[in-house]
Image (cartoon, rainbow, N blue to C red):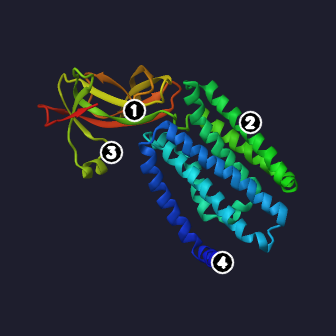
């Protein structure tokens, strides 16, 4: 009786429940993932992947065994909810994780793909009963997980490591398909061509995104960064810099915060990029200015810095330039292959005196 009322309530307010779930899940994942360790994130990702796999397998076991007869309707309802919850939670976490500290203009197609799956999971539930779609989404989750986790365990970021991620994803999918054959061979065999087309489409699409630098360079995460006046290192090894204070309203209105530069003053950009322990790679500060004549961004210099992961607050490094021309500038924080980690924007304005400054410690 209670289950029946719950099912009626769910189906009556399904659309509103789905929208509310997206908002609550997104806020919760954003708050919990922001400060979670790599180990914690990995454990939660694995939990949702396992829940997704088990619920899909059990769902089709019930269909194969009972043909969704009345006696299994209640169990089917709960297993279907579990599948939607685990897949939705998985893509919510991936979206939050992949979107931290990077320039939206660089990686929006991949994030749009993750967000579309997150929203679609809640708003288009009737399509999620299709086995081919369920397996394709599950494969996207597996691939998204290995893209970030294989570099963590190999302590390296490279094209070779990305290829390993793809191979690990295909192997996991192959094992999952064998399990599907065991629980529901007839339905799996009937959908096999659509499943293969769906999975290969996801595999090709993710490879296109990666080799065109449309995937954020996880597990690297921008922790902090900005443009500053002056620079020094104290006895404890902390970076001491000074910035021009701004209000929240000014930050919202000004795409390029103003940097009042006195003649002859050096301009410093300091960044802190988190990488997992023992992961070694190289980061680039690409200083660019906007050329009003050609209406293009021109690279003025690229400064390469090797980093090693492990510091919770991120690996700190800085670069500086002198005699900058007035106008709009930006510093792209990138990997060697051009994946954008973050972007720092500012406008150089000539000044006769140094403005009031606030101290910042890294």
Residue designated by label 4: 4
How far apart in space, not on screen, are marks 3 and 4 (Cα)?
A: 53 Å
Q: Quadrant of the image for the N terminus?
A: bottom right
Q: Secondary structure at mark 4?
A: helix
- Camera-side mark, 1 or 3: 1
Residue 2, image x, y percentages: 62, 77
Q: Secondary structure at mark 2?
A: helix
Residue designated by label 1: 312
Between 260 and 189, which is closer to the camera in this rendering?
189
Q: Quadrant of the image for the C terminus?
A: top left
Q: Residue at x 76, y 69 (%)?
A: 72
Q: Secondary structure at mark 1?
A: loop
Between 351 and 178, which is closer to the camera in this rendering?
178
Q: Is residue 208 above or below residue 253?
A: above
How far apart in space, not on screen, are marks 1 and 3 (Cα)?
A: 29 Å
How far apart in space, not on screen, are marks 2 and 3 (Cα)?
A: 45 Å
Q: Secondary structure at mark 3?
A: loop
Q: Residue at x 44, y 55 (%)?
A: 27
């Amino acid at each position: 009786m209670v289950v029946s009322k719950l099912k009626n309530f769910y189906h009556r307010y399904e659309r509103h429940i789905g929208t509310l779930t997206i908002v609550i899940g997104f806020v919760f994942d954003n708050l919990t993932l922001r400060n979670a360790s790599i180990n914690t994130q990995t454990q939660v990702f694995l939990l949702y992947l396992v829940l997704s796999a088990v619920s899909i397998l059990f769902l089709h076991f019930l269909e194969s065994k009972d043909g969704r007869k009345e006696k299994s309707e209640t169990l089917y309802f709960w297993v279907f909810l579990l599948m939607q919850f685990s897949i939705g939670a998985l893509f919510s976490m991936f979206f939050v994780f992949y979107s931290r500290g990077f320039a939206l203009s660089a990686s929006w197609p991949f994030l749009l793909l993750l967000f579309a799956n997150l929203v679609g999971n809640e708003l288009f539930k009737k399509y999620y009963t299709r086995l081919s779609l369920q397996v394709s989404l599950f494969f996207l989750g597996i691939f998204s997980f290995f893209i970030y986790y294989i570099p963590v365990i190999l302590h390296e970021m490279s094209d070779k490591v990305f290829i390993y991620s793809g191979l690990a994803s295909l192997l996991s999918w192959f094992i999952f398909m064998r399990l599907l054959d065991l629980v529901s061979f007839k339905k799996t065999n009937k959908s096999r061509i659509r499943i293969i087309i769906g999975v290969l489409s996801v595999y090709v699409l993710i490879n296109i995104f990666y080799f065109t630098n449309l995937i954020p360079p996880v597990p690297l995460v921008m922790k902090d960064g900005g443009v500053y006046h002056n620079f020094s290192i104290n006895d404890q090894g902390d970076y001491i810099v000074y910035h021009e204070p701004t209000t929240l309203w000014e930050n919202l209105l000004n795409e390029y915060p103003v940097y009042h530069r006195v003649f002859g003053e050096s301009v410093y950009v300091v960044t802190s990029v988190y990488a997992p322990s023992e992961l070694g790679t190289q980061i680039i500060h690409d200083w660019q200015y906007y050329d009003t004549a050609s209406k293009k961004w021109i690279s003025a210099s690229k400064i390469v810095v090797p980093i090693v992961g492990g510091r919770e607050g991120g690996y700190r490094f800085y670069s500086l330039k002198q005699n900058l021309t007035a106008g709009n500038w930006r510093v792209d924080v990138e990997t060697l292959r051009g994946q954008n980690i973050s972007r720092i924007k500012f406008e150089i304005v000539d000044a006769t005196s140094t403005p009031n400054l606030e101290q910042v410690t890294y």
